[in-house]
Amino acid sequence: MADFIETSNTRTAVRDLAVPITDITTFNTVVQTVIDTNPFGCVDYVQSGVSHAGVEKNRESHTAKVNYEDALANRVGAVSAKSPTVAAFNGAAAELMANVALETAMGGDAVRDAEHDTYGTQLKCHDANGEIYYVSFSRDKVRISSYQDDAIRLGVENWADTVPELA
């Protein structure tokens, strides 16, 4: 039998945030700042004939939560809406809150449960050394994955140290 032979050594590093990011607007601002300012010094590249920015969104998913409460403020139901973009998240949350027929069906008033909303965006980054790695943001963590060079982790860590929302 042939053995598997290690061909690369990729790593993952996680920063647990002391306080979850408060809202989708703050979350989106942090992510968009990385895309707009490229604080990691990533470089544009071509892969399979397609040009890519040095930093680009790889995927995202955000979930809005709404509870339904009766006259005594007891939770009688709940719904969530998983959305592919921040704009869709905001639209879905507004629709859920305004949906009188759903309130009637649930037997209670719609109340946003923003504290339990979830946010997630993964950025694909191309380092100047040629490595492609990922920086994933959630409400309570930042994860760097698929990197080899410690300089990548240090660069992301040094940048995160300057962002109060990522403390």
Image: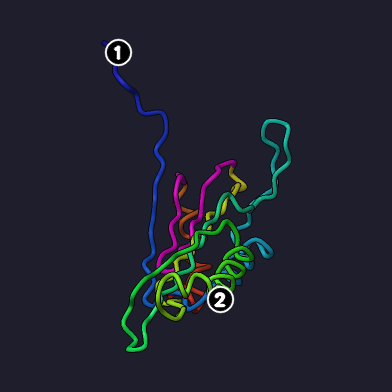
- Assess disc 1: are there few (<14), some (14-19) or many (≥20) residues with their C-alpha within 10 Å of its C-alpha: few
Question: Is residue 17 rendered magenta in the image?
Answer: no
- Name the quadrant containing residue 139: bottom left
- 10 Å neighbourhood of mark 2: few (<14), some, or many (≥20)? few
- Label 1 residue SS: loop
Residue reaching furthest top? Answer: 1
Name the residue type under label 1.
Answer: Ala
Label at residue 150: none
User: Looking at the image, is mark 2 or mark 1 nearer the viewer?
Assistant: 2
Residue 80 position within the rendered picture, expressed as x and y whole percent measured from the top left: 45, 64
The residue located at (45%, 54%) in the rendering is: 144
The residue to which callout 1 is attached is: 2
Magenta stretch, overall SS: strand
Tell me whether the residue at label 2 lies in contact with that at label 1, contact meaning CB atoms closer than 8 angstroms. no
Task: State the image coordinates of residue 34 (x, y, percent, origin top left).
Answer: 61, 64
Magenta stretch: give its range: 130-148
Tell me residue 16's x, y (percent).
36, 67
Q: Nearer the viewer, residue 52 or 97?
A: 97
Which residue appears at 72% of the width and 36% of the height? 50
Q: Is residue 150 above or below residue 18?
A: above
Please report whichever mark, 2 or 1, sits nearer to the chain's N-terminal start: 1
Residue 97, placed above or below residue 61: below
Residue 66 appears left or right of 5: right
Label 2: element kind: helix
Horizontal arrangement in the rendering, residue 23 relative to residue 15 (left or right): right
Residue drawn at (31%, 82%) of the image: 74
* Residue 26 circle label: 2
